[in-house]
Amino acid sequence: MTDLPVFVNGAADGTVNPADRGLHYGHGLFETMRLCGGTLPLWDWHWSRLCRGTAALGIPLDRETVWNDVRRACGQWPADGVIKLMITASSGGMAYRHDGGPCNRYLFYRPLPERRDFMHLRVCDYRLPVNPRLAGLKHLNRLDQVLAAAELPPDRDGLLLDTEGRVIEGLAGNLFLRTADGWLTPDVGGAGVRGVMRDYLLAEIFPALGLAVRETGVALSQVHAAQELFLCNAVRGIQAVTAIDGSDHPLAADEIRRIKTELARRLPCFAA
């Protein structure tokens, strides 16, 4: 797929300005989106998160311009795959000070990853710093994830805790767990990413099934004792967790199956 164009500010195979603030300071955000039959089924949810992020980072953003870029790119790429949309704070300003100029827009395509319905997790030694100002955003500063990923073998995903010892998320997805008290998902108000699939499940799928879920602080002991566990993101959908740190986790996935079935009914690209 190396012959497929990368779009820069709407132009196929456009050039990157070496003064781009995303390159120098990580001043930007990105969305990783599932492309299915030439459409982006979660586009509105991605756009909502992108708007929250650009507002927080002071980056101007125009929906029509970005959407025109996306449509143009999708017309030249395969109908199914993964699109990465990256927004940076352009190249204006002096050092750390941004002049508020228009953003730069980048679009990349890659094929869908190999399907994995089950995940084996390893608790990472690296701890996420607590920073409520940036928590929840899909910003370009991903060194926390890079350092955590360096600990992992290829067949494991990471489980990330913060510096206070609270469980936050998977390396590339949000965590949901069913305990004796019901469904929980870690609060990401101090660290971690507020995932698009997480938002969709909380707003649409859990209510449709009559399942209550709480966003709260989660201890590692609760994860080990959970009756059901899954990770989710906007590319892979839902993946049940079957082992943690080399120990099998009891696979009681009755409610996970219900959640996956309802998700697939609404968004067939995530069909089980």
Image: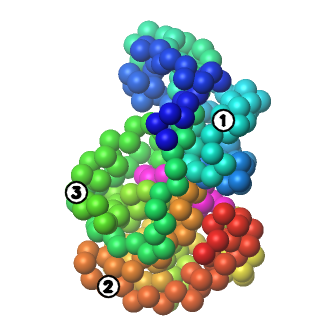
Residue 70: in magenta span? no
Give the mark, 1 or 2, whose residue is nearer the N terminus. Answer: 1
Question: What residue would you read off at disc 2?
Answer: 248
Colour treatment of the image: rainbow
Question: What residue would you read off at disc 1?
Answer: 76
What type is the residue that disc 1 sits on?
Answer: Gln
Q: Position of residue 122 (x, y in %)?
A: 29, 68
Above or below 1: residue 81: below
Question: What residue would you read off at disc 3?
Answer: 151
Q: Which residues are magenta?
A: 189-200
What type is the residue that disc 3 sits on?
Answer: Glu
Dot 3: within a 10 Å radius of its alpha carbon, few (fewer than 14), some, or many (20 or more) residues? some
Dot 2: within a 10 Å radius of its alpha carbon, few (fewer than 14), some, or many (20 or more) residues? few
The kind of secondary structure element at disc 2 is strand
Give the mark, 3 or 1, whose residue is nearer the N terminus. Answer: 1
Q: Which mark is residue 176?
A: none
In-front residue for pair 33/51? 33
Q: Position of residue 148 (x, y in %)?
A: 28, 53
Residue at x-position 58% and y-position 57%: 234
> Can you see residue 115?
yes
